[in-house]
Image: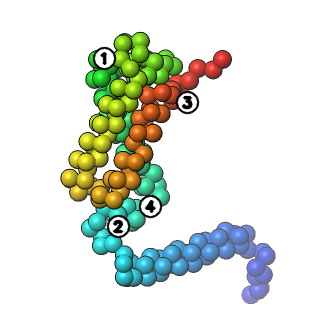
Amino acid sequence: MNRIQMNQIPGKKFLATITAAGLLTVGAAGAAVAAENSPGTPSSDTPAAQEQTQSPSQNRATHRGVRRGAIRVAAQAAAATIGVEVAELRDAVRSGQTVGAFAEAKGVSADSVVTAVVAALDARIDQAVTDGKVDEARAAKVKERVPEFARRLVNTVPKRFQTSG
């Protein structure tokens, strides 16, 4: 029986990669168990702990869903303030117009639209706190960012709807 040298095995790099990945997985699992048992870690039934246990792709998906929900609430508030249907507002933005410019064309100031969007989003955040979906510290942090989010939403056109030239 011939002795096989390591350089003659065709999947040597593949095998080394799989072994390294396995060791990293075991190491990460050990670190997770150690962190789980450490004092000061939030209990698993708190929103903060649930957020920490999600994978990065789940965090991105959750963030994307939250952002879409915020945009939906903001669009409804803006449309109601301007006095149009959401579909009409959406068509104006898709044609390259800002929400603020569309509001001004309808005789409503852009600042009043921003104020309405901030009020609607703050109410939605307060409801999330009441429902236990978000803790108060996180809600306060998010509320700090709402006015800037509302100003950008009203005064800029999303990149995908900007016309070139």
* Quadrant (top left, top right, bottom left, bottom right) of the C terminus: top right
Q: Marks 3 and 1, Cα distance to the nearest angstrom? A: 23 Å
The colouring scheme, among rainbow, by chain, secondary structure or one colour, is rainbow
Amino acid type for the residue under numbered disc 1: Val
Counting residues from the N terminus, which is met first, the one under dot 4 or under dot 2? 2
Q: Is residue 109 left or right of residue 20?
A: left
User: Which residue sits at x=51%, y=75%?
Assistant: 28
Mark 4 highlights which residue? 55
Instruction: Name the one closer to the observer, 88 or 13.
Output: 88
Q: Which residue is mark 1?
A: 84
Which mark lies nearer to you, 3 or 1?
1
Q: Which residue shows up at 38% across the image and 35% down it?
A: 71
Which labelled disc corresponds to residue 101? none
Report the amino acid beneath label 3: Lys
Task: Place residue 2 in its image quadrant.
Answer: bottom right
Looking at marks 3 and 2 on the same chain, the residue that comes earlier in the sequence is marked by: 2
Q: Amino acid at mark 4?
A: Ser
Say the numbered circle drawn on residue 49: 2
Q: At 36% across and 26% down in the image, what residue appears?
A: 113
SS type, badge 4: loop
Labels 4, 2: front one: 2
- Sequence-first tag of 3 and 1: 1
Question: With respect to residue 61, does 156 lie above or below?
Answer: above
User: Based on the displayed image, in which of its 4 quarters is residue 20 positioned?
Assistant: bottom right
